[in-house]
Amino acid sequence: METKTILIKNTTILAKGLRKGSVLIEDGKIIDINNKIRFWGIDEVIDAEGKILIPGLVNTHTHLSMNLMRGLADDLPLDVWMNDHIWPVEAHLEGEHCYAGALLAALEMIKSGTTTCDDMYFFMDDVARAIDESGIRGLLCHGMIDLFDEEKRKAECKETKRIIEKCHNTADGRIQVALGPHTPYTCSTELLNWVRKKADEKGLKIHIHVSETEKEVEDSLNDRKKRPFEYLDDIKFLGPDVIAAHAVWLSGAEIALIKENNVKISHNPLSNMKLASGISPVSDMLANGICVSLGTDGAASNNSLDLFQEMKIASLLQKVRTLDPTVLPAGAVLEMATMGGATALGMEKEIGTIEVGKKADLVLMDRRAPHLTPYRNPVSHLVYSAEGPDVSTVICNGEILMRENEVLVLDEMEVIEMAENASEDLLSRR
Ligand SMILES: [Zn+2]
């Protein structure tokens, strides 16, 4: 990456409270936050008067390429949705579909202020290509499903190894690779053991869906006489490197296991609501000191990747669950979408806050809009009133991806047309 100096001046910075000031970026990092920053030798000056500067948002559970399946099968329970609609389409996926879907998703995320995502899907080298071109940050894993079949298991391990070798630590470090066993009910114990061993050996994260529906827990109790997190603890799979998506149906003992093993949670309220999966006990987990982050899940079960929607719903849903309006206040949910996400992905030293020495993953929000007026309580506005389209400028790793609502890294119309064609082609193969 070439040396580039960017100055964001006259802005309101969300960093340990709010303050007026300027932020200086050099070599992809924040090197100064001040009111009196030098103005010479700067490649690019962004006058951010009337804007609020926040850390880039972190989406800790998604399936980017499923953007091609947006609106394909709505209003169905998870098992019917997956078995009868999603899997039959996914059987025809090719790398170019995944590339087009991921590029569309990256565009959608840039336009709504997300600079980092944790993605599990297929043809991940094609997804990595899209992440590389779009300039965002991604922790990517091949979704492994062996359905208790040895041949399938071997093929899944081989594909995972291929993706690690090809993509881990690429694109100036913006792309990392994780291990992605799909769920405890689609993966054998042998596969989960292989994943644990590989994670320890290579220091990689593990991304898995756990306890999304009540049926999953009932089946686990029938088949294994244990609840999903109890089973995972039993086989010594759990650890601080595990990012567990959903975690909706939890017993008190399972919350204790999550805490004990320092497992990171990705809460996906909109997907859980749409598939009527249930409500995760997020405020209980937070009260126990568990790291809970936010994810959108794929666009086939959300149907948007806008983390502003996710933040608002996450907060409201906990209030409804507990009948207590004081739980999960705006500041706490904003933390989940920024530092919580960074911590879940093991990137807490690099991203998640606006601090000197951290990577410049930054988002400018327009605050001069009817729905954000009066400008009294910006943190409340960010969670309860703001929307993706309020994002005006996005910087990731010190590169300007969008400036004053103009995406600089991708041709928007070209990406949309490519995704339309890829989706049509994919669905015609059913
Ligand atoms: Zn998912």
Image (cartoon, rainbow, N blue to C red):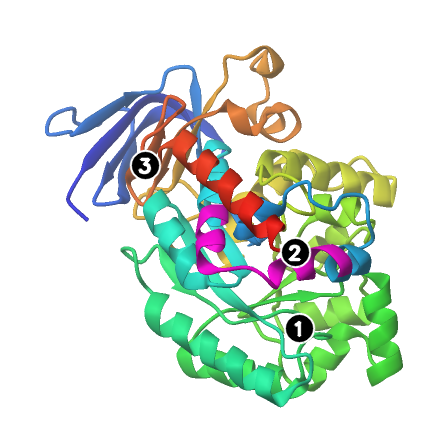
Question: Residue 129 vs residue 211: left or right?
Answer: left
Give the side of residue 406 with respect to residue 318, left or right: left
Please tell me how crowded label 3 is: few (under 14), some (14-19), or many (20+) other residues with Cα within 10 Å: some
> Which residue matches tag 3?
409
Rendered image: mark on residue 260: 1
Q: What residue type is labelled 2?
A: Arg
The alpha-carbon separation of the residues under discs 3 and 2 comes to 33 Å
Residue 97 painted magenta = yes
Residue 291's quadrant in the figure? Answer: bottom right
Q: How crowded is mark 2: few (under 14 residues within 10 Å), some or many (20 or more)?
A: few
Residue visible at 16% across and 30% down in the picture: 43
Which residue is located at x 53 percent, y 51 percent? Answer: 65
As displayed, is residue 20 above or below residue 276? above
Q: Mark 2 points at which residue?
A: 430
Question: Where, quadrant-wise, is the C terminus in this rendering?
Answer: bottom right
What is the three-letter code of the residue carrying label 1? Glu
Instruction: State how far apart marks 1 and 2 are (Cα).
Output: 45 Å
**Disc with the residue nearer the chain's start (3 vs 2):** 3
Residue type at mark 3 is Val
Badge 1 local density, few (<14 within 10 Å), some, or many (20+)?
Answer: few
> Secondary structure beneath disc 2?
loop
Q: Is mark 3 on a helix, strand or loop?
A: loop
User: Magenta stretch: residue 279 in it?
Assistant: no
The stretch of residues the image draws in magenta is 84-101
